[in-house]
Image: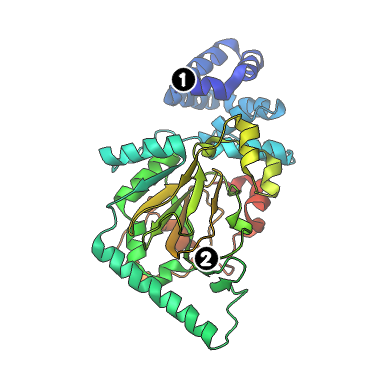
Amino acid sequence: MKEQIKFFLGTSSLFILLFCFNKVQADDLMNAVVQGNYDGAKTLLEESRVNNHPLDPLLFKCAVDNQDYRLVALLMSYGLCDTKLLEGASRPFLHNIRELYQRLPEPGFCDQRLSELGAGYVEELSKNGIVRISGLVSASDLASMQKDFQKFVDSMDDQRARGINVENRRDEYYCPETNVYHSNNPFALSTTLVDVCCSSEVCSIINTYLGKVGYITKGWATHYMPGGKDVNFFTWHHDKSGSRLKMMILLGDVEERSRHLSYVLGSHEISHAYETYGCGQSGIDYYEKLTGKAPVVFKALGKAGDIFLFDPNGIHKANCGEVTRDTFIITYSPDKHLIFKVTLPYQFFDNKVVDESHPFFRVLAAQSRKYFMPAYGGWLGSLDHVDAWY
């Protein structure tokens, strides 16, 4: 941890501190931060406020003035910032701050529910960016979700057979290029899915990896039929959406010939430049150029009921193939902005405590919103709205 903090602060920040503040206060503050004694650092900052000589505004201003995005991100993670000072900052600078800020763990965060087995999954996820989890979905839950999913597929088949145009719709639609049925309301399709999404084992792994509570932002039911073209998310890309995890539940066996997911192992650690967020497409040559390594591609093959957790900051793609793949895909993120308005089975939440530690907390709060999409036009649009980052 100490080495990480030294890296985040950098020598430039040490220079800033020693020359901008009372030297004794600066030394005490820097020693506390470098030693990982954040409670002590925060106490020093609070005392400086009481004495009417607050250090943190000066510290934050120096970090902003010197374009030290690492120190800005660190201070923001502890709430020691004045975001008004970032008004008018360049978008590449804001991008660098947000990318690091969202990946810093919440100070003192710990999900006590994490099991020894779960810790092993977190370790593999942290190393590779993707992990396969078997055995968490019971046979009865799997059968229930398969039944619910089939109703969605049957409905889409029936509408198409009757000549109804099911393309270009918001909630449930067909994409002819990729030959896929999509539903943006998977929770309305299956109450069992909602229950699985709230699993303490799943959530503890996700929260520990993110270093803070991961909230469900949206989800999909996807029926990948044979064929399709290599377009859109069937080409190599990274999601332009910051720190988050996706959970993919396989509803049937997925083999080599299936329309499986491919993932470049370790690519989740890449810090993507602001310019790449404009296109999101990142081929294998992009990975090789950035890392100097030959890519190791993982194929998400497994049995019905298997769960894959993967960091979509990594380079990945769906594949065309000969065999159908049915999945539920759910997004978890600590970001408070990218919340979509989805249909929920409200009866599931009756007599349940839904507080700020609950994965559906923010989705439920968004139900009073008029529009389906988040404000500010998505991830790139929210970059200038610092208060919306978390």
Instruction: Using the numbered discs, state the Cα–Cα distance from disc 1 to disc 2 in whole angstroms.
Output: 41 Å
| Residue 368 in the image, given as x and y percentages of width and height | 51, 68
Image vertical order of residue 55 relative to residue 141, above or below: above
Is 256 or 132 nearer to us in this picture? Answer: 256
The answer to whether residue 272 of the structure is visible from this angle is no
Residue 325: quadrant of the picture: bottom left
Looking at numbered disc 2 in the image, what kind of residue is underneath it? Lys
Residue picked out by circle 1: 2
Q: Residue at x 45, y 59 (%)?
A: 258
Q: Is residue 92 above or below residue 376?
A: above
Disc number placed over residue 42 in the picture, else none: none
Q: Residues within 10 Å of mark 2 (few under 14, many from 20)?
A: many
**Looking at the image, residue 116 lies above or below residue 53:** below
**Residue placed at 68% from the left, 43% from the top?**
276
Q: The residue under label 1 is which amino acid type?
A: Lys
In the foreground, 219 or 104: 219
Count of marks overlaid on the render: 2
How many residues crowd around disc 1 within 10 Å: few (fewer than 14), some, or many (20 or more)? few
- Residue at the image position 62 percent from the left and 25 percent from the top: 59
Q: Name the residue beneath numbered marker 2.
A: 341
Which residue occupies the extreme bottom position in the image? Answer: 162
Q: Residue 174 location, x and y as percent?
A: 56, 73
SS at circle 2: loop
Which quadrant does the N terminus fall into? top left
Residue 365, image x, y percentages: 47, 61
